[in-house]
Image (tube, rainbow, N blue to C red):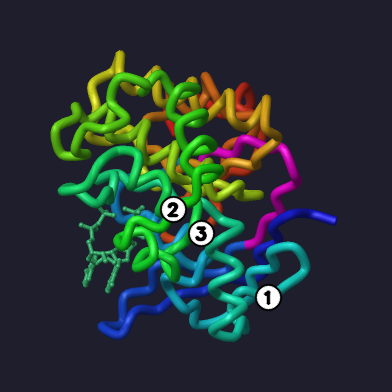
Amino acid sequence: AALLEIRNLKKVYNDGTTALQGVDFKVDRGEFVVVIGSSGAGKSTLLRCINRLVQPSEGSVMFNNMDATKASHSQVRKLRREVGMIFQGFNLIERVSVLTNVLHGRLGYMNQLMGTLGMFSKHDIEEAKKILHRLGLHQQIYKRADELSGGQQQRVGIARALSQQPQLILADEPIASLDPVTSETIMNHLHTICQEDGITCVVNLHQVEVAKKYATRIIGIHKGTVAFDGKPDELSDEV
Ligand code: ADP
Ligand code: ADP
């Protein structure tokens, strides 16, 4: 079965804006899907419907055969443990160390208080350090998150998501605020995670060229509907 199956998804916000309509697609395990579309197309709403940051108006989002749109409070928590999220603005806890940020991903938000009290286990700390090594952040482990460059902060974001051991990673414009060289580094890390760890990735981008370079599949969103769904080489450059 598909890891993710979106059926007839619709989202109308309270102010009457229709952000998504009639969206249908499946994602299999191991895919590296890039969702492209211009600003306001509905990409961010789409990702947020998957981990229930947004409640869709109609349709279903099946994740591992569970309908995320009907998930109970505890099922939403389980869903968010299995779905790692990476943001354009990194969303790190600025005043604490890189290591603590990653540990919070590992333990989940329910356990943040324990972390604040210094109750991370030795094993958790070792695992978090291993992930930071892998992302080339071994020299930044004890730095405050807000002392890092944008590219380093996004690598912390990736490390935090990885430390959850998720089945799916959703990245919402992860390179939108980074320069082209740093962007390549971030995309390479995401690609490696998908290939080596088998973690399925769905990445929102607005740069078609970057999408074509990394995606195994591209979904084009235009005005809230799927305008393209296929292999990168089937997509013309004008889209
Ligand atoms: P994208 O990520 O492709 O830029 P979004 O999903 O952010 O697109 O936005 C899709 C549409 O929904 C836009 O018209 C946007 O202004 C609107 N929108 C997004 N969030 C909200 C919200 N909370 N309330 C009302 N409209 C929203
Ligand atoms: P992003 O950088 O993800 O595109 P935005 O700046 O579009 O974020 O939106 C920031 C927040 O405002 C989000 O929570 C989004 O859902 C909400 N939002 C976006 N567009 C609108 C809108 N037209 N009306 C109300 N809220 C909106």
Residue 5 is situated, as x and y percent measured from the top left of the image, at: 70, 61
Mark 1 and mark 2 lie on one chain; the one further toward the N terminus is 1
Give the x, y percent position of residue 155.
37, 31
**What's the residue at 54%, 84% (across, down)?**
73
CA gap, disc 3 to disc 1?
A: 21 Å
- Residue identifier under label 2: 120
Q: Label 1's element?
A: strand
Q: Residue at x 24, y 52 (%)?
A: 93
Which is the main secondary structure of the residues drawn in magenta?
A: strand
Quadrant holding ligand 1? Answer: bottom left
Query: Where 233 falls versus 142 (above or below)?
Result: above
Do the CB atoms of the residues marked 2 and 3 lie less than 8 Å apart? no
Q: Which residue is mark 3?
A: 225
Circle 1 residue: 67
What is the crowding at mark 3: few (fewer than 14 residues within 10 Å), some, or many (at least 20)? some
Q: Hey, which quadrant is residue 45 in on the image?
A: bottom left
Identify whether 58 is placed above or below 141: below
Is 78 situated left or right of 158 in this image? right
Q: Residue furthest right?
A: 1
Image quadrant where residue 229 sits: top right
The answer to which of 154 and 40 lies nearer the viewer is: 154
Residue 48 belongs to magenta span: no
